[in-house]
Image (tube, rainbow, N blue to C red):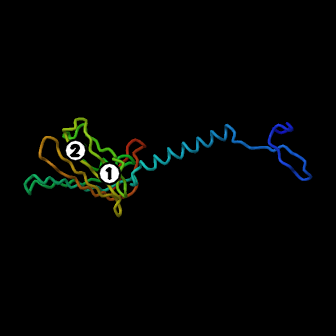
Amino acid sequence: MPGSHGNGPQISGQNGAKRDTLIALPSRRTGCNVALCLAAWFLFGATARGQAPFQPGTYEIVVETVMPHLEENLRYATIREVRCVRGGEFASLFPIMKHDSMSGCVLRESGDRDESVRYRLTCLQPDVASGSAWLRPAPGGIDGVLQVKMGGKNMTFEQRVRAARRGDCQWNGGLRPLARPG
């Protein structure tokens, strides 16, 4: 400590005189600041990694459902819509997930990432269905495929999604986003 002579570390100065040396240790406050910075860095990094690489907005969505087990004239169904898609809603691009037959099933991010986001289909009752999906950035929008095998049946199908971004969402008094026509 300054002012205490002879007890702390000392250094020899010019003429051989001894002086006290002040050693700066991190204060408790500095340690807390470092801990806060590290915690924020880890939290921000996890959040950034967990976000889909897609921009929220109004999308023109075309979904083709393919059911290979049906006759040719019933095998394909196409849905077209324009709607607002917010940040955490990109798995909702697959409309079959809203159907009663998929009640209790959700698409959960599997954690495997390259340029695409991959999902695993999980159901409260595992014998209902199983499957996987992926979404990836495409020029001007998003492409994706959901592949499903219905449990207990020899029935498989897939939904192919192409969503073209048409701009930002319009807001209806801050309550609900409205799709803005292209």
Residue that badge 2 annotates? 130
Query: In which quadrant is the N terminus drawn?
Result: top right
Circle 2/circle 1 CB separation < 8 Å: no
Residue furthest to the left: 71
Which of the pair 3/16 is nearer the observer? Answer: 16
Q: Which residue is pictured at 26% across the width and 55% down the height? A: 161
Asked whether, in this view, residue 180 is left or right of residue 126, the answer is right
Disc 2 and disc 1: Cα gap in Å? 14 Å
Please, what is the three-letter code of the amino acid marked with disc 1? Arg
User: Which mark is on residue 166?
Assistant: none
Picture coordinates of residue 164, whole percent (x, y): 32, 59
Q: For mark 2, give the secondary structure.
A: strand
Q: Within the image, what quadrant is residue 61 found in?
A: bottom left
Picture coordinates of residue 145, whole percent (x, y): 26, 54
Q: Within the image, what quadrant is residue 60 found in?
A: bottom left
Residue furthest to the right: 15
Asked whether, in this view, residue 64 is left or right of residue 13, the answer is left
Q: Residues within 10 Å of mark 2 (few under 14, many from 20)?
A: some
Which of the pair 170/44 is nearer the observer? Answer: 44
Q: Within the image, what quadrant is residue 142 found in?
A: bottom left
Asked if 74 appears above or below 174 in the picture, the reply is: below
Which of the pair 172/61 is nearer the observer? Answer: 61
Please, what is the three-letter code of the amino acid marked with disc 2? Ser
Q: Which residue is pictured at 10% across the width and 53% down the height? A: 74
Asked if 176 appears above or below 70 in the picture, the reply is: above
Q: Which residue is pictured at 17% across the width and 51% down the height? A: 157
Q: For mark 1, give the secondary structure.
A: strand
Residue that badge 1 annotates? 118
Residue furthest to the front: 16
Picture coordinates of residue 116, whole percent (x, y): 35, 56
Which of the pair 180/123 is nearer the observer? Answer: 123
